[in-house]
Image (cartoon, helix red, strand yellow):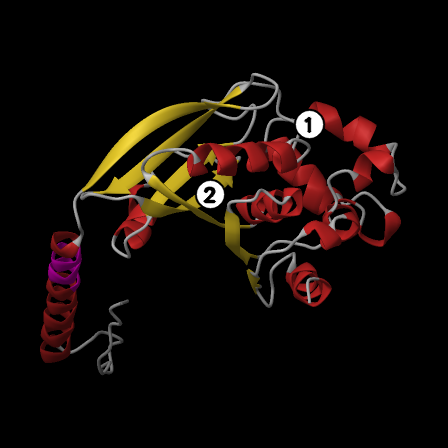
Amino acid sequence: MIPVLYGSMNAFGTYDNKDFDMQKWLVTTTFVFCTLASWLSMAADAPFTHKEYMTEMRDGVKLAMSVYTPEGEGPWSVVLMRTPYNKANAERRARRYLNAGYIFAIQDCRGRYLSEGAYVPFEDDMEDGYDTVEWLAEQPFCTGKIGMTGDSAPGITANLAAAAAPPHLHAAFVGVAPRSLFYESRFIGGVFKESHAGGWMRGQGVADQIPGMKKRVVMDDHWKATDLIHHREKIKIPIYNVGGWYDIFSHGSIHNFKYLQ
């Protein structure tokens, strides 16, 4: 809720005192109401436990993962997010799933933050997504049913995990993620997209990878290995797609939905 100040202005361009007093009352009341609502919401949150794991991938590299578990007997189904944006401070996000009776697990992608390995955006996310889903399914706290979620880059990692077809991945909720990294992010119209891919990669600290990427301007076997349009037939789970009308991946989200029908 956003408090809005209003009142009638007098001939000198200032607000009348009675209007100003009303504004102060409205702002104060709104602030108190929002604070109380926040406290009540926190009070309603169920207790949980938080543990850190280093999960080993098929090549021996270990990836850092936070697991938030509801209090009680279990086992529970798991909602997983894999992110290059830092898994730390995920408690607020975790609570929506904890309160609904799910475990929430969030993992740093390979080479990011607390995870081992070299970071090459999205190149290992099919295999790492598969291995992480299956690792979770084997844990005593898990029912064996895993769902994935994420928006933008974490949404892309969810799509790629789905393309790897881990047996225990049952569904995904994906926001603002393209169908094709090549055609809808990196080389829109056949030209490397500096404002999208270039700026994002610099922000991710991998600007040194851009020159090599610019040399591969056609869809070769390297790009095909991690581009969703070449793995559609492997996806067997339902994926709920959400797009933003003015998002950079607005077309990609629609194409992703149509492509998976």
Q: Is residue 168 left or right of residue 51?
A: right
Name the one closer to the observer, 163 or 10.
Answer: 163
Task: Tell me which corner region of the image, top left, top right, bottom left or bottom right, holds residue 7.
Answer: bottom left
Find out whether residue 119 is within the magenta segment.
no
Q: Residues within 10 Å of mark 2 (few under 14, many from 20)?
A: many
Task: Tell me which corner region of the image, top left, top right, bottom left or bottom right, holds residue 157.
Answer: top right
Q: Is residue 212 left or right of residue 117?
A: right
In the image, what residue type sits under mark 1? Ala
Q: Which residue is mark 2?
A: 81
In the image, what residue type sits under mark 2? Met
Residue at 72% across / 63% down in the picture? 259
Q: Which mark is residue 207?
A: 1
Residue at 73% across / 54% down in the picture? 232
Which element is circle 1 on? helix
- The answer to whether 89 is drawn above or below residue 170 in the figure is above
Q: Is residue 125 left or right of residue 23?
A: right
Name the one closer to the observer, 146 or 260.
Answer: 146
**Does label 1 or label 2 sit earlier along the sequence?**
2
